[in-house]
Image (cartoon, rainbow, N blue to C red):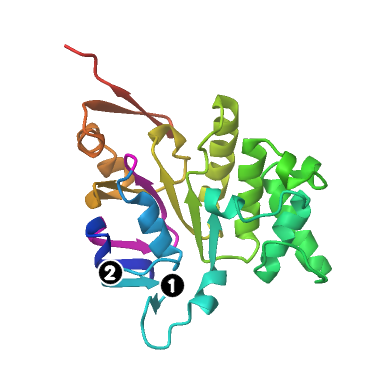
């Protein structure tokens, strides 16, 4: 399997502070990774490198075979090959557009409709992704009127529109109530198990948000990688306790994970 993402000794420094420090990490084709860690650990920084919107201060980063900052690399050719769903993207999208328009504009790499005409194949594709994410009944709803869960599902459908080779999910379950979280986790699990789906990287704070089908975990704290590898070996109580800085117990039941703190002595 080829590498979808390869970071070698990567650091990102801002105002003298390392947001990520000497990170080496690789994601291979077909893998589904979770980046797990506390606030300020460097999770979103890693995701921004993977999206090609942030270059390392030191080290090398290769995304889909293209080295960031390398001779001959054009990030504007690279970015359509990467699907992104997160709060940053949601903030760029017009609230007045319908759900269907919001997904369709991704076919042209745009955030808002202009005077473009969409082919039937584009509309069929957008409808299919929205149906897969339970949004068929909302096609004509304005994006700005959606609930948080509906908005998250629309963003994921939009990220899939360009048939990406790498799908990046930035805290997709943040802000959802229990029902919304469980519905999204179930749908992400179906996507993660699909052998034709792209390689995936998801950022989260909570092990309960890890969908079935995700294969690997990277744990990061204060910009440094604490553990990286297959979920079943690396998502341990010891590693999670080190990652979050307090005693935690990880439990694996069926195809889901939970974590809880140990009682105070």
Residue corresponding to mark 1: 64
Does dot 1 land on a helix, a strand or a loop? loop
Side of 114 where 84 appears, left or right: left
Q: From what the image shows, is residue 120 above or below residue 133?
A: below
Badge 1 density bin: few <14, some 14–19, many ≥20, Cα 10 Å = many
Outermost residue toward the left in this view? 265
Comparing 203 with 54, the one in front is 54
Using the rendered image of the protein, determine whether residue 86 is visible from the camera's viewpoint: no
Badge 2 density bin: few <14, some 14–19, many ≥20, Cα 10 Å = some
Residue corresponding to mark 2: 57
Does dot 2 land on a helix, a strand or a loop? loop
Residue at (43%, 32%) from the top-left corner? 208
Q: From what the image shows, is residue 156 above or below residue 60?
A: above
Comparing 139 with 212, the one in front is 139
Q: Indicate the quadrant containing the C terminus: top left, top right, bottom left or bottom right.
A: top left
Q: Where residue 98 appears, x then y in whole percent?
A: 78, 50
Residue at (41%, 57%) from the top-left corner? 47
Which mark is nearer the camera, 2 or 1? 2
Side of 142 where 66 appears, left or right: left
Comparing 88 with 16, the one in front is 16
**Mark found first going from the N terminus, 2 or 1:** 2
Comparing 187 with 75, the one in front is 75
Numbered range of the magenta stretch: 19-39
Residue 47 on the magenta span = no
């Amino acid at each position: 399997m080829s590498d979808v993402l390869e970071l070698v000794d990567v650091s990102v420094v801002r105002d003298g502070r390392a947001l990520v420090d000497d990170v080496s990490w690789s994601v291979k084709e077909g893998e589904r990774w979770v980046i797990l860690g506390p606030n300020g650990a460097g999770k979103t920084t890693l995701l921004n490198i993977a999206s090609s919107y942030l270059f390392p201060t030191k080290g090398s980063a290769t995304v889909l075979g293209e080295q960031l900052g390398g001779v001959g690399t054009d990030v504007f050719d690279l970015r359509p090959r990467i699907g992104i769903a997160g709060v940053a993207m949601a903030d760029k999208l017009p609230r007045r557009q319908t759900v269907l328009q919001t997904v369709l504009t991704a076919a042209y790499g745009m955030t808002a409709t202009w005077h473009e005409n969409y082919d039937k194949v584009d509309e069929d594709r957008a409808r299919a992704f929205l149906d897969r994410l339970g949004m068929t009944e909302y096609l004509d709803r304005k994006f700005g009127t959606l609930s948080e869960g509906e908005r998250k599902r629309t963003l994921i459908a939009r990220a899939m529109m360009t048939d990406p080779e790498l799908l990046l999910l930035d805290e997709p379950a943040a802000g959802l109530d229990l029902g919304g979280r469980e519905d999204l986790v179930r749908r992400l699990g179906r996507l993660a198990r699909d052998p034709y789906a792209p390689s995936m990287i998801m950022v989260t704070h909570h092990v309960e948000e890890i969908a079935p089908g995700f294969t690997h975990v990277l744990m990061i704290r204060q910009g440094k990688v604490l553990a990286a590898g297959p979920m079943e070996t690396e998502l341990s109580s010891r590693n999670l306790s080190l990652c979050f800085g307090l005693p935690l117990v990880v439990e694996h039941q069926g195809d889901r994970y939970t974590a809880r703190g140990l009682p105070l002595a």
